[in-house]
Image (spheres, grey):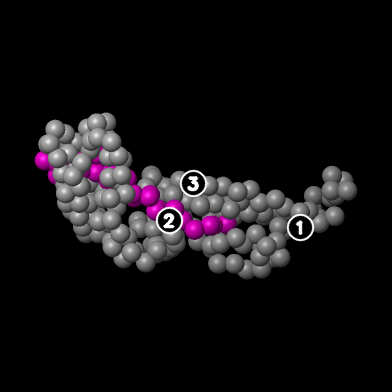
Amino acid sequence: MLANRDPCTLNVFEKYMAKGIIRLCYRKIIDAASQKLWDKYVFDDTYQEFFMQAQYYNQQGKYSTFQELLDNVPNADRLHHLISSAAIGYIRQLNQLIPDIANQTGKLCLPFSQFNFEIIQSHVQKKPDHRVAISFYSDELTWIDTINTMLLIAYGQQQEALREGKAIATDLISLQPYLSISSYQPIVSHPVL
């Protein structure tokens, strides 16, 4: 019976079991203050697209801000999707690696296959008021441990390899603003009797 086992005989997987399967979300905010060239391109092109699309939704010129359009114009919530088309080419340039999130060697390392674009605010006559966010969702990761303010992760579902004592490739990712765990699935261990 497991309850009567000597704790020294627990297998390595039980002692160092991964915490779970997670997906990380990084919310990248882009506005007039953004300094990176990629961010500036996304800022300029999404603002231009907003300016053009807002004219369609606001043919009488009554509203100046994105929020006013949302509050007063039917289907204006579609602007999020419509404006995202201006960012798609830039997102493809990332080669499915989440920007700004590097491992401890300084290398971008988190793969993503899903993202969500949103307009935070914008103004048809004031480009500096334009602000957007792109949320990048990582592929599945095995969360092995937390070391200080860093997550020790492996790519994909690696619980079987850990259980078998195999070596796996890992990375250390620093926790930072706008990076969060977007989903968590606990790993159920099956103790050896």
Mark 2 or 3: the one toward you: 2
Decide if residue 119 is on the left or right side of residue 148: left
Q: Do the residues labelled 1 and 3 touch (CB within 8 Å)?
A: no
Give the residues in magenta: 114-142
For image coordinates 19% across by 36% down, the residue present is 65
- Mark seen at residue 82: none
Q: Quadrant of residue 101?
A: bottom left
Quadrant where the image shows the C terminus: bottom right
In-image side of 1 versus 115 (left or right): right
- Mark 1 element type: loop
- Whole-number angstrom distance, CA of label 1 to CA of label 3: 30 Å
Task: Kindly identify which residue carries mark 3.
Answer: 182
Callout 3 secondary element: strand
Measured as percent of width and height from the top left, residue 163 is found at: 70, 61
Q: In the rendered image, which residue does mark 2 sit on?
A: 114
Q: Which of marks 2 and 1 is in front?
A: 2
Pointer 1 residue: 11
**Disc 2 residue type?**
Gln
Circle nearer the N terminus (2, 1): 1
Q: Main secondary structure of the magenta part?
A: strand
